[in-house]
Amino acid sequence: MRIQRGAIVLVVVLFACSDCTQADSEAHSPHSTQPHITTTTHASNTTTNPATATTLPVFGTRTFTVSGVLLSGGNWLTVGLHPTTTPVQLKASGATPLEVCPAGLDGGLDDSSWPPLFKFQSCMHLSPSVMATLPATDGETHVAFAIKEISPGPLSPLQVSVTYNATDSFVEVIPPATTSQMYMTVSYTPLSATTGVTATPINLLTPAHGYSLDVMQDGRALTQMELCDFPTELTSCFGGAIPGQPVAVQLVGRGGPVVLNLAWK
């Protein structure tokens, strides 16, 4: 049988078009297993759009102050918090020379919460006119530090200001052990409409006997309890706070060792 030359060309073209149609169909099929990559072409260069990295929001930079504390007989004030990798800064003033020391989250000086890699193994002298910078952490660890007199002296008032970047809402303040009446005040400015405040015995969740709490803002007491409007381990918060206005928490009383637990956004 004789086949004309033009017929051969037609068969080849039809075969080629059939393969192209099949490949195109597979590439655009909704069940295709091939990954879809968005590209941008400029002249002869082809680039892949970079992936966008997302990070969890942090609580940001915040400052709080502790006042009304009296040091005597070699006792100390302990502060616990959860900083980011940005170092904690603090300023402390008293009637006698002071130092800041690594401490445990239960307020002890013999069970440091600072791993050796943080390089905070001994006390640092504090100047009342200079902001001190503590060693940086890994951003994943709750740490505590103590403010104490270098040499125990007579009754001395203490005021401490702490500025840091917070990883979470956790803050604890453990006042000096004393047998006299205590009037300790912690002041801060929340950006949330609630703030968490409890006073408990160390390592316990029950209320501390012999102590009372007052949470004040702009001359009014915050007394209504409600759900916290920010992530926290506390089960409830004082509501009715005005974001951006200072809050003062006063712990008053006499009794066994106590920890003031605070949380705000």
Image: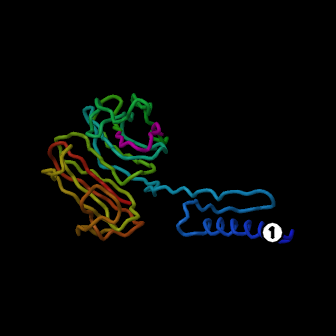
**Percent from the top left, x then y, of residue 224?**
23, 69
* Label 1 element class: loop
Mark 1 surroundings within 10 Å by alpha-carbon count, few (fewer than 14), some (14 through 19), many (20 or more): few
Residue 14's place in the image compared with 106, above or below, is: below
| Residue at the image point whose x is 38% and y is 53% from the top | 168
Query: Image quarter for residue 239?
Result: bottom left
Query: Where 170 falls versus 224 (above or below)?
Result: above
Q: Position of residue 139 (x, y in %)?
A: 44, 44
Q: Which residue does the image show at 62% across and 65% down from the upper left?
A: 27
Q: Is residue 18 visible?
A: yes
- Circle 1 sits on which residue? 1
> Is residue 98 in sight in this rendering?
no
Residue 209 in the image: above or below residue 92: below
Check residue 28 for magenta coloring. no
Where the C terminus falls, by quadrant? bottom left
Q: Position of 236 compared to 44: left or right?
A: left
Residue numbers of the magenta segment: 133-144
Q: Residue at x 35, y 68 (%)?
A: 193
Look at the magenta stretch and give its main secondary structure.
Answer: loop
Q: Report the quarter where the N terminus lies.
A: bottom right
